[in-house]
Image: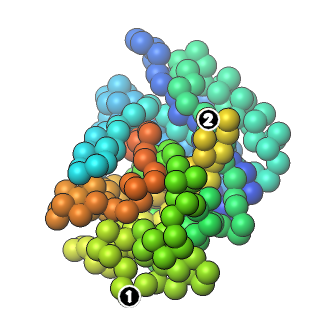
């Protein structure tokens, strides 16, 4: 029986590493992917497959596509689509580093590392702005329904689609704003997380209210903050039974529907963007039937 990769629905670990890889020119990915599929997948790893890699294998996954590049008034959302994504999770950063290197070695020389980002849980699940992240995440059966594909067929049932973006925050600029202005950007009061009735139309909560879309745009967020010598921000990760719900939210955030841009862009910007197909498991191993493997 096909099941989802367990870390998708599991609570966040204390630390994580996000690795994006590219397929080498004229490289054959089959052997490396079969080696990956021979390993047990537990809640320490999620694997995502990019659209160009699916095409390289001569396969097709309905609904999988490259991340869109979008622009709106005062905002730009880049597409930096890669071929393979690893979300390596755990509570010990050293173990995460070694686990990531082990998988990278397994995939070489067909795949090379393109980007690596380390992340962590802050203050029980807050963004570095100190606002709670993922307040409206669906729970339990609703989370599974939002994040996991079902009723499609072998190799896809139990799978998930994921949007991955690295957002860079200007925290000095944000923290210099009056508290009321910060609350209105987010659409919630920082002190008690209560949604503000009088927040402007640009408030993030209003731009992304999942029930306000037709059909409703529910996703399961698994985002974590990042910080290094170059800056800080949020690794945004949203799982869905398709990519449509996330893309509907992104289009509204960038003002594609009504010209109103999400207030987040006043202090933060996305610097990467990729879509991936996260295959289901058969037993405890990746089911790559949808890829012809």
Name the spot of residue 201 as percent of width and height, x first: 29, 74
**Left or right: residue 274 compared with residue 94:** left
| Comes first in the chain, label 1 or label 2 | 1
For mark 1, does the 10 Å Cα neighbourhood hold few (<14), some (14 to 19), or many (20 or more) residues? few
**Label 2 belongs to which residue?**
230
Name the spot of residue 47 as percent of width and height, x first: 55, 43
Residue at position x 79%, y 44% from top? 93
**Left or right: residue 28 compared with residue 227:** left
Name the spot of residue 89 as percent of width and height, x first: 69, 49
Residue at position x 74%, y 57% from top? 14
Residue 134's disc is: none
**Position above or below: 293 against 278:** above
Q: From mark 1 to mark 2, how far is it between C-alphas?
A: 36 Å
**Which sits in the foreground, 112 or 132?**
132
Residue at position x 61%, y 29% from top? 35
**Which sits in the foreground, 41 or 123?**
123
**Label 1 belongs to which residue?**
197
**Left or right: residue 187 compared with residue 66:** right
């Amino acid at each position: 029986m096909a099941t989802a990769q367990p870390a998708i629905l599991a609570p966040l670990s204390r630390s994580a590493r996000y690795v994006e890889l590219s397929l080498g020119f004229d490289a054959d990915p089959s052997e490396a992917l079969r080696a990956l599929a021979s390993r047990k997948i537990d809640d320490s790893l999620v694997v995502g497959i990019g659209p160009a890699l699916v095409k390289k294998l001569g396969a097709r996954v309905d609904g999988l596509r490259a991340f869109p590049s979008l622009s709106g008034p005062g905002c730009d959302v880049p597409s930096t689509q890669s071929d393979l994504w690893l979300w390596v999770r755990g509570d010990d950063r050293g173990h995460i580093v070694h686990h990531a290197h082990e998988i990278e070695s397994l995939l070489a020389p067909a795949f090379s590392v393109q980007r690596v980002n380390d992340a962590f849980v802050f203050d029980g699940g807050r963004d570095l702005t100190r606002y709670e992240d993922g307040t409206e995440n669906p729970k339990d059966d609703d989370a599974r329904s939002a994040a996991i594909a079902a009723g499609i067929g072998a190799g896809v049932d139990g799978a998930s689609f994921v949007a991955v973006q690295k957002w860079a925050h200007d925290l000095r600029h944000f923290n210099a704003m009056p508290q009321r202005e910060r609350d209105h950007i987010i659409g919630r009061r920082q002190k008690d997380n209560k949604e503000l009735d009088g927040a402007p139309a640009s408030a993030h909560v209003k731009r992304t209210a999942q029930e306000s879309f037709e059909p409703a745009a529910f996703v399961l967020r698994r985002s974590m903050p990042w910080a290094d010598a170059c800056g800080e921000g949020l690794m945004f990760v949203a799982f869905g039974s398709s990519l449509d719900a996330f893309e509907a939210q992104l289009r509204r955030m960038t003002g594609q529907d009504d010209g109103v841009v999400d207030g987040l862009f006043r202090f933060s910007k996305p610097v990467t963007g990729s879509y991936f197909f996260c295959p289901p498991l058969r037993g405890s191993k990746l089911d790559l039937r949808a890829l012809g493997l």
